[in-house]
Amino acid sequence: MKKFGNYLLVAVGVGTLSLTIAFANVGQVAAQTTQPLLVNVPVRDVDNAARHNFEEAFGCAAPAGQDTCSFVPFIVPADKILVIETVSARAILTAGQQPVVNLSISQPAAATAHQYSLPLTLVASNGGTNIFGSTQLVRVYARPGGNFDFIVRRFGDTGGVAEFLFVVSGHFVNTR
């Protein structure tokens, strides 16, 4: 009789554990896709129609004898806020030169622009050329009608062409 009681207690314990596990998995759905492996499947912010991805590449070249070059500013559409989340920068300079790079944000009706320094690190050196680079995670906002661009400069002699390349990514948020 005592053995039967122990078996009964074990059976009740296993049954309780089984029910707990079964109810703990209610509401969970396994994610599956029928897409080919090389196709991106949207999984983030699909339910947030107000967010729209943004990615843009910029570049300029300073000819020999000049220490800077300029970019055409990117103007934020009137009904959007641009949230910049990642900035990747690369500078290709003559050996001995050093880059200085700033992200500049101008807001509508603002008297001054906000500048964010982007430190670059020497990545590679090949003969008379040095390549500097950096990828920075940021959270910078540009309001509707505002703009952003880059302010670049090289220090040292100004011999040779200096190339500056940027990739900016983030998202737009609808204001209406």
Image (cartoon, grey):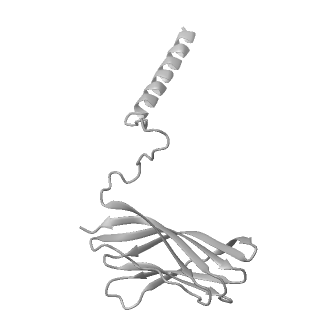
**Left or right: 130 with respect to 69?**
right
For image coordinates 33% across by 66% down, the residue present is: 173
Q: Where residue 38 appears, x then y in whole percent?
A: 49, 43
Q: Where residue 35 sits in the image (x, y, percent)?
A: 43, 38
Asked whether 156 or 174 is in front, the reply is 156
For the C terminus, the quadrant is bottom left
Q: Determine the residue positioned at 50% across, 17% down.
A: 11
* Residue situated furthest left in the rendering: 176
| Residue with the most extreme top position | 1
Looking at the image, the residue that sits furthest to the right is 127
Which of the 4 image quarters holds residue 54? bottom left
Indicate whether 115 appears above or below 33. Answer: below
Frontmost residue, 40 versus 110: 40
Q: Position of residue 87 (x, y in %)?
A: 51, 70
Indicate left or right for 117 with 158 as reference: left
The quarter in which the N terminus is drawn is: top right
Instruction: List x then y, in percent, for residue 85.
Output: 47, 67
93 left or right, relative to 173: right
